[in-house]
Amino acid sequence: MVKLNHPSTFSVVARDPSNGDFGIIVQSKFPAVGSVVPWAKAEIGAIATQAWANVSYGPRGLDYLAAGKSASKTLRILLKNDSGAQHRQIGIVDQKGHVAAHTGNECKSWAGHHIGEGFACQGNILAGEDVVANMAIAFEGTEGDLIDKLFAALSAGQAAGGDRRGMQSAAILVVRKEGGYEGGNDRYVDVRVDEHPSPIKELERIFKIYDMTLLSRENPSNLKPIEGVLSVQIQQALVSLGYLDKVSMNTFPDSAKIALAEWTNTNNFENKARDDGTIWQSVLDYLFQDAKGNKP
């Protein structure tokens, strides 16, 4: 078997103590990192396997966690009798929020990990130790849900120098029991950028659309009443896009409501549809950019 080069990678593996979600976010100088590093199962745990990754660590490790083994016990089992153990890097979090991590002595410099409460940051072939240290600080210090914390950590790692060899792909995976499309699976968030010169920013861009389409995370304070100037602006945007014939200056007529609903459905934003005379700020932003011919 040909031994592949170590992809330079940094990642976070974590559990949200408030709801039990598990998540992993990763960036690498390697194509399609989302197909290699992140492994997670709702109510069981999450694993990031990287460096000279042993991808069998993912499904095997989740089986051990499902059988009730702790993160640390699972790690010991995976490393035992693995002749390539010193080339591996792995982070594991179990259903109790316990964390274990390993950076082999043969992982290419700089390589290391940081274990925090319910999370681990790890990376190899990095600009330096500040990459994982800053990721941990950002993860712990960011307000919001697990998704917000994961994105903040990844951005902080890149700001500290990230992969010494550059950027190529990125991915985020968050699992929640019946959290996927229509409750049919556990993939609450599964977004990947397989090859791009700025994969973190591209991941953020795509996730914003994914968030609008499939998730319900937006704060109610972001709801805006459709009235006055805003009513006119929405109608003008719908006219420019061909969904409405004319603008009413005094009301938001039924024709405008129908047009807005049609535009919403066309863009797969039914999850954000409202029938109470309000509109989400994120939908507004997308509508106005769409009207300018500049979709996000």
Image (cartoon, helix red, strand yellow):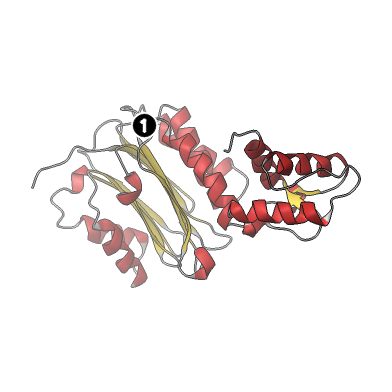
In the image, what residue occupies the spot 35% across and 66% down? 65
Front residue of 12/179: it is 179
Q: Position of residue 194 (x, y in %)?
A: 35, 42
The residue lying furthest to the right in this view is 250
Quarter of the picture holding the C terminus: top right
Q: Position of residue 161 (x, y in %)?
A: 41, 26
Q: Position of residue 111 (x, y in %)?
A: 30, 35
Question: Residue 121: in sight, yes or no?
Answer: no
The residue lying furthest to the left in this view is 1
Quarter location, residue 59: bottom left
In the image, what residue occupies the spot 30% across and 58% down? 58
From the viewer's perspective, tell me whether residue 52 is left or right of residue 288.
Answer: left
Q: Position of residue 162 (x, y in %)?
A: 39, 31
Front residue of 194/157: it is 194
Front residue of 166/150: it is 166
From the viewer's perspective, tell me whether residue 94 is left or right of residue 286.
Answer: left
The residue lying furthest to the front in this view is 245
Residue that carries the numbered disc 1 in the rendered image: 167
| Up/down of 265 relative to 241, above or below | below
| Up/down of 186 relative to 141, above or below | below
Front residue of 281/129: it is 281
In the image, what residue occupies the spot 91% across and 45% down? 250
Q: Amino acid at mark 1?
A: Met
